[in-house]
Amino acid sequence: MLAGVAVIIVNFNSGALLGECLRHLRAQTRHPERVIVVDNASSDGSADRLESEYPEVECIRADRNLGFAAANNLAVRRAGEVKWLALLNPDAFPQPDWLERLLAAADKHPECASFGARLVDANDPGRLDGTGDVYHVSGLAWRRDHGRLTAAGASVGGDIFAPCAAAALYRRSAFLEAGGFDEVFFCYFEDIDLGFRLRLLGYRSRYVPDAVVRHVGSAVTGRRSPFSLYHGHRNLVWTYVKNMPGPLFWFYLPQHLLLNLGAVLWYALRGQAGPLLRAKRDALGGLSRCWRQRYVIQSRRRVSAWCLRQTMSCGLLALYRRGGGGGG
């Protein structure tokens, strides 16, 4: 019977953040069987410092930037026969009992294949960074409770659409059954896409409020940077096309089209039309591949469209409040 957990971190020029993350891992009350860092050809010396200061950590040096999705898949292949995969961003600093709390929740909820942590803003610990990912029927996704006061809630565990992969636990068998991360995504929205495919296979996801992580968020790529806007808005189209079941796909397609048009207009008014237009152009260019993937994904679906719809957000007010954002 499989046992154990491997913690996986993808590093790209994370500098001192990676060391801070690893120091917090060393302080865990439940030590992982393996810690694997995939370095995506960093140029800041962070991989060299890792190897000299943390000899217990396995460092895989890629010869180029593979992206978040492919680097995690590589680490999963190297992780071996563990039961659990704990993903952690280098700018995420877990509390000492983070891993212990996630594994305790996993034992208590065998129906779930993924678990999300309580993310707090590393620069403002009084505010939440997220309590799980929300997926709207239009194709937009965001981190629940992002920016809210920590005291305002988020203290009760429960079902979520998917965990934010900045600090999440996945059952390895389910991760592999779903096909892992889509490597064409490179980064952004890949955790939503994976969570969607796990949902289609009948797996559930749970938020664990006492598994706490301080998260900087987009420390390397930058929030609302052209890079993050491009990948987030390209990948949200691919996620919708691949995963939304037939009845829901056609019913909510007008909302999806309006979302994409509205996002372009939203960012055009803010002088950022370029990344959005490139994202939508390239999203259209990848539709034939997505449609082929869709055939395989939908043929394996184990839940009804109605049951899946119950896990999504549908209110227009919620969509309006998110503005033109693309992803968590």
Image: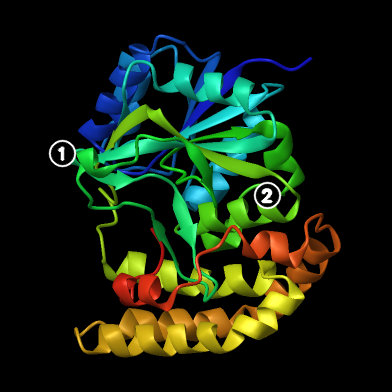
Separation (CA) of disc 1 from disc 2: 32 Å
Label 2: few (<14), some or many (≥20) within 10 Å?
many
On screen, residue 205 above or below 315:
above
On screen, residue 256 above or below 203:
below
Q: Secondary structure at mark 2?
A: helix
Residue 90 rendering spot, x and y as whole percentages: 34, 36
Q: Secondary structure at mark 1?
A: strand
Q: Are marks 1 and 2 in contact (CB under 8 Å)?
A: no
Which residue lies at the image location 33% right of the left edge and 66% below the top edge? 227
Is 85 left or right of 40, judged from the image as shown?
right
Please indicate, yes or no, whether residue 182 appears anywhere in the rendered image.
no
On screen, residue 270 above or below 92:
below
Residue 60 rendering spot, x and y as whole percentages: 50, 31
On screen, residue 186 above or below 163:
below
- Residue 294 quadrant: bottom right
- The residue that mark 2 highlights is 198
Inspect the image, locate mark 1, and give the three-letter code of the amino acid beneath it.
Answer: Gly
Which label was assigned to residue 199? none
Which residue lies at the image location 62% right of the left edge and 78% below the top edge? 286
- The residue that mark 1 highlights is 126
Which residue lies at the image location 70% right of the left edge and 44% below the top edge? 203
Which residue lies at the image location 35% right of the left edge and 34% below the top edge? 155
Residue 267 rendering spot, x and y as whole percentages: 27, 83
Label 1: few (<14), some or many (≥20) within 10 Å?
some
Split into 4 quadrants, where in the image is the C terminus? Answer: bottom left
Please indicate, yes or no, whether residue 7 appears anywhere in the rendered image.
yes
Residue 300 rendering spot, x and y as whole percentages: 84, 57
**Mark 1 or 2 closer to N-term?**
1
- Depth check, mark 1 against mark 2: the one in front is 1
